[in-house]
Image: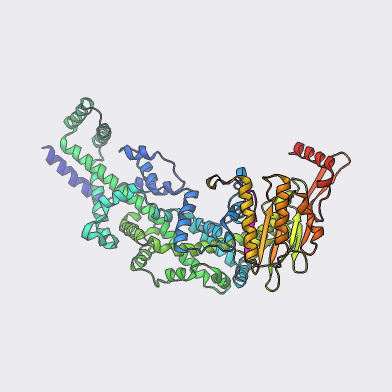
Amino acid sequence: MIKYLFTLLCLTSFIISSHSSASLGGYAQIGAIALESEPTLNQDKVKRDPQAKLEEKAQLLLQVPSNSAAKRKLFRLFDVADPRPFNSIMYPYSLREINILVGDGESRDVHLYAQLDRARTFMGKVALARLISEPITDIPLILCRQQALKVLIANRSKADLNASLAFLMETIGKHEKMLLNAWNPAADLDAELAKRVYFSGIFDSWNTKPHCCEVVRKFYYGGTALLAGVTCGIIGVLGWQLYNTVSAWLHYQIPGKIAAPLSALYVGCIGIDIYNIYKLKAEFETQHYIYTSLYKRMQPLAATFYAIDALYVRLQQKDAAPLRAVMQNYNQLKDFCENKNISCCLAVLKKVLMSGSFAQENGTWQERLGDAVTAYALLHKVKDELVPVMVALGSIDAYMSVASAYCQSALQPQRYVFAEFVEQGSPVLAIKGLYNPLLSGSQIKASDIYLGANKPGTLILTGPHGGGKSTYMKAIAYAVQLAQTFGIVPAEKATLTVFDKLYTYANIKEELGQGYSTFMAEKKRLDDIQKELLLSTELKTLTVIDEPLKGTMEAEGALRVERFLKQVAPLKNSILVMATHFERPAQLGKEMPASIVNAHPELVEKSTGEFVRTFTIVPGPNEWWFTDAQKRERYINWLTCVN
C-alpha cells in the first residue's frame, strides 16, 4: 500500500514540478560567493564531513590560488612557453645584490621591481619581472620600447589607447585566477565529474560534444525537479533531517550499539522505500551542486575570452602600432583571436564560451549547463595552448605598468626621463640629477655622474658611513638597468652607452656550502671580475663595487684593492665605480688622474658638534676621514646617537 501511495505522490510531484521553475535555485549563487575572496577552509573537515554545507564544498572546489602561488605558477608556465636564453649581460647574483626583484632583510618589499609595478594582472607582474631582470644590448629594440611607452603616456584621456587597454586588462585580471586553476584543478571536482558527469572509455570523446553533455544535463535537471517535489512536505522535511543525522552517524562509523538502533528506528518510523528516496535525493543535490560549481568556474573564463578579443581589436588601430612592435607573442595572440593555426579543440572552446550561454541572467543559466561541462573538458585539453596568449597579454600589461610609473613620477620633483644612447667610441656614463628610485619624498637627493669619453672611467668614492655612497652606487646600477630594459632613467638627463656586461659586488656573504669564509667569498668575487675584465677588453662594461674585501685586515685588503685598480682602471672600455674605506686605493686618483677620479658624500660639521648629511655626492677625495682621527670619532659618536 505504501508503495502505491508513494508512486502516486511521485507522479503528482512530477506534474507540479514540470510547470514550475522552482528546483534547487537557492544554490545558484554558491560559485559567485566563492569567487569573492580566497577561502581558507579546513579541507580535511570538508572532505570528511558528508553533511558539510554545500557553500563550503563549493568554496573548496572553486578556491583560487594565493597571489604568490599564482605568480609562481605563471613564472613556470611562461618559462616553458617562452624560454629565455642565458642572460650574458648580468649574472643572477646581481639581481639579488642590488635589489632588482627583492629587498634585503626586513626591507624585502623595497626593490626596483616594486617601484614600477602597476600591473593589473598577474600575467603582467610576471612579464614585468622578466623584462626588468633581463637587460639587452639591442639599441633598435630599446628605442622601440621607448616609443611604445611614449604612445601609452601621450594624451592620457578616457578615449586614448592606454585607457582602453587598462579597462580590458582590469577585466582580465579580475578573472585570471580562475583560469590558472586549469593547471591546478580541484581534485574533488574532477573526481566527481569523472564519476557522475563525464563519459569514459571509448566514449571519452563525447565529453567535448556540447549536444551529448546537454542530454545528460536535461536528464539530471528533470530528476532533480521530481525529487524536489517528492520531499517537499512537512513529513518529508522531518524525514530528510533525520536521514542526514543517521547518515552522519553511520559515516563516522559509530559503534554498532549506537548506529544500528538509530538506523533501525529510522527505517521503522519512515519506511525503507522513503529512506532510499531520500538517499537518491541527496545524490541529486550533490549532482546539482557539482553542475552549479562547474558553471561558476567557467563564467570567468568566458568573460576573459571576450576581453581578449576586444583587446585584440583595439590593438589593430593605428595608434597601437608601436605597442604591437614590442609585444611578445603578438602573432600567437593574433592567431588565437582570428581562429588561425589553433587546434580544433581550442576553436570549439572559444565557440562554446562565446556563445552567450555564460552571459545570461540568473534563473536561465540552468538550461545551458551542457556548455559548462563541455568547456571544462576542453579547457583541460588545450590549456597549454593558451600560455603563449597569456605571455602576450602579460607583456602589454607590463608596458602599461611602466608607463603608469613614468607618468606618476612626472608629478614629483624627481622624475624619469628617456635615455639617449651613444653607439660609437669608448663607453660613456653622463647623467645629470641622478637619484635612487627606491627612495621617496625628502629622502631623494640627486647627484651627477660623468665618466668615460674624454673623462676618467673609474670613480672612487670615499667618506664616512651613512653618507649615501651605497645609495648612490645603486642609483647608478638602476639607471643602467632601466636604460637597457625600458629606455628610461631616474634623472633629469641621461646619455650613456649600452653596456655588454654589468658586474656587481655588494654585501658578499660567506658561502658555507662551498666552504668559503666571508673574506674568501669576497676575494673570489673580486678575482672573478678582474679575470673577466682582462679577458674581454673589447666588451663595454660597467662594474659597481661596494667596499671590497672588508672582511680582512686593512693592510691586506688595501693591497689587493690597489692591485685590482691598477690593472682594471686603465681599460678603455671599462666604467668602474667603487666605494672603499681603504686609504691607499683612494690615493690612486692622484697617481692615475687620466683613469681615476675621486668623489665623496657631502658632510658639514656645525659648531655645536652636530653633523649635517646632504646625501649628495661631490667631486674630490674625503681627506679628513683618513687623516683627522678626532673628527672621525666625533662623527661616529654622533651617527650612533642619531640612529
Look at the picture and state if 227 lies above or below 164: above
Question: Is 524 in front, or is 335?
Answer: 524
Q: Quadrant of residue 52?
A: top left
Image quarter hosting the N terminus: top left
Q: Along the horizontal axis of the image, is 179 left or right of 413? A: left
* Place of residue 135 in the rendered image (x, y in percent of width and height, measured from the top left): 59, 63
Q: Is residue 510 magenta?
A: yes
Image quarter hosting the C terminus: top right
* Place of residue 109 in the rendered image (x, y in percent of width and height, measured from the top left): 60, 48
Question: Is 362 in front, or is 117?
Answer: 117
Look at the picture and state if 399 lies above or below 93: below
Asked which colour scheme the image uses, the reply is: rainbow
Residue at image point 75% right, 37% down = 640
- In magenta, the rendered stretch is 501-512
Residue at image point 52% right, 46% down = 513
Q: Quadrant of residue 532?
A: bottom right
Question: Is 472 in front, or is 376?
Answer: 472
Farthest right residue? 607
* Place of residue 121 in the rendered image (x, y in percent of width and height, measured from the top left): 51, 56
Question: Is 308 in front, or is 522?
Answer: 522
Q: Along the horizontal axis of the image, is 502 left or right of 37? A: right
Q: Is residue 102 visible?
A: yes
Q: Is residue 251 magenta?
A: no
Look at the picture and state if 370 lies above or below 45: below
* Place of residue 605 in the rendered image (x, y in percent of width and height, measured from the top left): 85, 44
Q: Along the horizontal axis of the image, is 477 left or right of 271? A: right
Q: Is residue 471 visible?
A: no
Farthest top residue? 257
